[in-house]
Image (cartoon, rainbow, N blue to C red):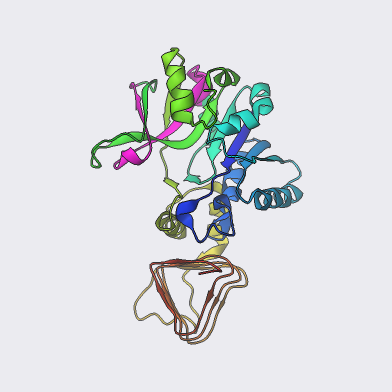
C-alpha cells in the first residue's frame, strides 16, 4: 500500500500568502497542512508516500527531507513537475508506484479531513472497486465534482462543477481517493488530466466499479484565506479530530492570559506559537491563532484573526477577521 499527495498547485486564491510558500505548507495551529496529511497516513501504517510538486517544489522537497530525518521509517519521494499536468497527472509521474501497489491512496495537498485511511482502504477493497472517492454531502456543491451514487455506494455519475441550485444538498468529491493499478489503464491521454472527467467518467463508461465513501467528520478545501482562517478556528475550538492536531491541541491550546491580553469579557481561546511575542499594551482577543515567531507590538489590536508564522503587527495596527503573513 502506498499514498500520493498532490502538492503541485499554485494556490492563486491564497495570494499573497502563497507568493513565498506553497499552499500545502500553510499552517493549521502552526502545523503545515502537508505535515498533518503525512502524519495521518503514517498513523494508518503507510510509510511509502509520494509527493507531486511543482510550484516552489524545492520548498516541498526540503520539508520532506526534514520529516524523513525525524521519522526514518518514512520514505517520502518528492517529484517536481516542470509543467503542470492537472491533479491526476500525479498518477503518470508516479506510475511505477501505482503499478507496484495493490492500493494507492491519493490525497489533495489542500484537503483538511478527518478520515480513517485504513478504513478507506478496507472499504475500497471490500467493494471490489477500481477507484473509490471520499465524498461529503453539502450545499453549494456546484463548486466541486458532484458524485451521484446508489444506496450501496456504487457511483453512477460524476459531474465536474455542474450548474445546480446552491441550496441543493449533494455529495461532492473531497479530493481523496483510493485506486487499484488498473485505474491507470483508463486514464485519459490528454495533456492535463483531472480525476473526475479524465478517470472517473471514462471508467464509468466502461462499466468499471467506482465506490463513494462518505466522510463522517470534518472536511474543508483550504482554497481561500477565509477557508484557512475558518479551519484554524475549528482546530482551535477542538472541532477537528485530525490525529496530528490532537497532540498539538493537548499542549498548545489554552485561554491565554498575560498582561498583553486585556479582555473586557470572557474570550474564546488564543493559540500562541513557539517564540511568538506579545508586547505589553497589545490586545489579542480570541479566537485568534498567533504563529511561531510572530510579534504583536504594543498598542496593536488583534481579534478573530490568524497570524501566520513570522508575522509582524506594528504598534497601533488593528487586525480583525483577517489572515496576515510575514509580507502582509
Q: Is residue 2 above or below residue 234?
A: above
Between 276 and 194, the one lying in front of the other is 194
Q: Is residue 45 above or below residue 67?
A: above
Say which residue appears at 60% left-offset and 25% top-offset: 103
Q: Is 7 covered by the magenta stretch?
A: no
- Left or right? Give the position of 173 relative to 94: left
Relative image position of residue 18 (x, y in whole percent):
54, 57
Q: Is residue 204 above or below residue 312?
A: above
- Left or right? Give the position of 85 relative to 175: right
Q: Is 126 covered by the magenta stretch?
A: yes
Residue at the far top in the pictured view: 207
Between 134 and 320, the one lying in front of the other is 320
Say which residue appears at 54% left-offset and 52% top-offset: 23
Between 226 and 14, the one lying in front of the other is 14
Which quarter of the image is occupied by the N terminus?
top right
Q: Is residue 202 above or below residue 33?
A: above
Relative image position of residue 256 (x, y in whole percent):
49, 73
Relative image position of residue 34 (x, y in whole percent):
59, 48
Q: Which residues are magenta?
A: 123-151
Relative image position of residue 227 (x, y in whole percent):
41, 54
Number of marks drawn = 0
Say which residue appears at 55% left-offset and 64% top-offset: 252
Amino acid at each position: 500500500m502506498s499514498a500520493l499527495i498532490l502538492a503541485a498547485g499554485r494556490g492563486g486564491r491564497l495570494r499573497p500568502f502563497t507568493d513565498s510558500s506553497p499552499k500545502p505548507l500553510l499552517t493549521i495551529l502552526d502545523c503545515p497542512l502537508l505535515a498533518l496529511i503525512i502524519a495521518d497516513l503514517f498513523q494508518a501504517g503507510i510509510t511509502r508516500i509520494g509527493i507531486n510538486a511543482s510550484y516552489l517544489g524545492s520548498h516541498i522537497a526540503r520539508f520532506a527531507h526534514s520529516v524523513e530525518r525525524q521519522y526514518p521509517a518514512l520514505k517520502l519521494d518528492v517529484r517536481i513537475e516542470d509543467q503542470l499536468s492537472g491533479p491526476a497527472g500525479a498518477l503518470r509521474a508516479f506510475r511505477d508506484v501505482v503499478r507496484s501497489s495493490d492500493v494507492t491512496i491519493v490525497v489533495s495537498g489542500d484537503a483538511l479531513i478527518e478520515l480513517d485511511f485504513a478504513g478507506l482502504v478496507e472499504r475500497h477493497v471490500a467493494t471490489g472497486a477500481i477507484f473509490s472517492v471520499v465524498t461529503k454531502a453539502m450545499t453549494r456543491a456546484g463548486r466541486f465534482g458532484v458524485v451521484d451514487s446508489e444506496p450501496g455506494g456504487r457511483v453512477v455519475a460524476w459531474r465536474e462543477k455542474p450548474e445546480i441550485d446552491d441550496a441543493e444538498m449533494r455529495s461532492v468529491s473531497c479530493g481523496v481517493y483510493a485506486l487499484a493499478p488498473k485505474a491507470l489503464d483508463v486514464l485519459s491521454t490528454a495533456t492535463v488530466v483531472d480525476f473526475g472527467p479524465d478517470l472517473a467518467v471514462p471508467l464509468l463508461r466502461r462499466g468499471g466499479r467506482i465506490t463513494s465513501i462518505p466522510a463522517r467528520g470534518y472536511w474543508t478545501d483550504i482554497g481561500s484565506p477565509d477557508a484557512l482562517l475558518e479551519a484554524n478556528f475549528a482546530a482551535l475550538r477542538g472541532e477537528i479530530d485530525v490525529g496530528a492536531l490532537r497532540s498539538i491541541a493537548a499542549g498548545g491550546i489554552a485561554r491565554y492570559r498575560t498582561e498583553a491580553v486585556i479582555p473586557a469579557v470572557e474570550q474564546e481561546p488564543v493559540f500562541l506559537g513557539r517564540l511568538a511575542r506579545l508586547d505589553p499594551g497589545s490586545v489579542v482577543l480570541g479566537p485568534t491563532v498567533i504563529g511561531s515567531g510572530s510579534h504583536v507590538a504594543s498598542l496593536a489590536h488583534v481579534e478573530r484573526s490568524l497570524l501566520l508564522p513570522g508575522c509582524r503587527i506594528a504598534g497601533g495596527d488593528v487586525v480583525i477577521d483577517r489572515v496576515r503573513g510575514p509580507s502582509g
